Image (tube, rainbow, N blue to C red):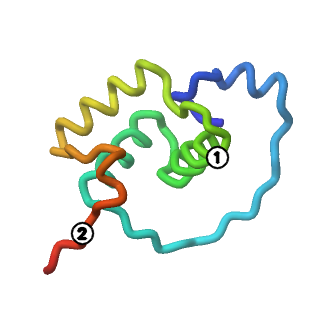
């Protein structure tokens, strides 16, 4: 787990032993402003971008909300700062900008 979830780290550490994983390097393309928001959030939470993405995905796979109300407010601030106006409804309508 990671900070920013609705479940606190202390509860998880007490009730859950470490889980060994094997990580691989990957090249993932993301929308530029979205990446800036994710990097800023990871930096604020003092974690790697990979750890943040893993936490988000694991929560999504279980249909759980990955962020607390406070973290959602912080995300909104980062979105405003970086001009990210994309919403979930936009996700199936992306068109690559020609360079």
Specify whether 79 is left or right of 10: left
Instruction: Decide which of 80, 3 is in the foreground and name it.
Output: 80
Find numbered disc 2 in the image and state the secondary structure of the residue it sits on. loop
Q: Residues within 10 Å of mark 2 (few under 14, many from 20)?
A: few
Q: Quadrant of residue 73?
A: top left
Screen quadrant of the C terminus: bottom left
Q: Considering only vertical position in the picture, is 91 above or below 71?
A: below
Quarter of image, res 1: top right
Seen at 24% across and 72% down, the residue is: 96
Name above or below for residue 52 compared with residue 15: below
* Separation of marks 1 and 2 at Cα, in angstroms: 26 Å
Give me the residue at 26% from left, 60% from top.
Answer: 32
Name which quarter of the figure residue 31 lies in: bottom left
Specify the label residue 95 is tagged with: 2
Residue at image position (17%, 38%) is: 81
Q: Residues within 10 Å of mark 1 (few under 14, many from 20)?
A: few
The answer to whether residue 22 is left or right of residue 58 is: right
Q: Residue at x 29, y 52 (%)?
A: 90
Residue toward you, 60 or 70: 60
Question: In the rendering, at what x and y percent does residue 84 appear?
Answer: 21, 45
Tell whether 90 sits left or right of 42: left
Q: Are marks 1 and 2 in contact (CB under 8 Å)?
A: no
Residue 64 lies, in percent from the top left, at 61, 33
In the picture shown, does residue 56 fall above or below 73?
below
* Picture disc at residue 30: none
Indicate the position of residue 50 as horizontal and vertical percent values.
Answer: 53, 54
Pointer 1 or 2: first along the chain: 1
Label at residue 61:
1
């Amino acid at each position: 787990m990671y900070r920013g979830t609705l479940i606190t780290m202390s509860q998880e550490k007490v009730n859950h032993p470490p889980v060994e994983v094997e990580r691989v390097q990957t090249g993932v393309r993301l929308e530029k402003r979205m990446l800036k928001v994710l990097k800023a959030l990871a930096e604020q939470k003092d974690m790697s971008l990979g750890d943040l993405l893993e936490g988000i995905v694991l929560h999504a796979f279980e249909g759980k909300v990955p962020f607390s109300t406070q973290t959602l407010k912080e995300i909104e601030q980062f979105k405003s700062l970086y001009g990210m106006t994309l919403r979930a409804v936009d996700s199936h309508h992306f068109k690559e900008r020609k360079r």
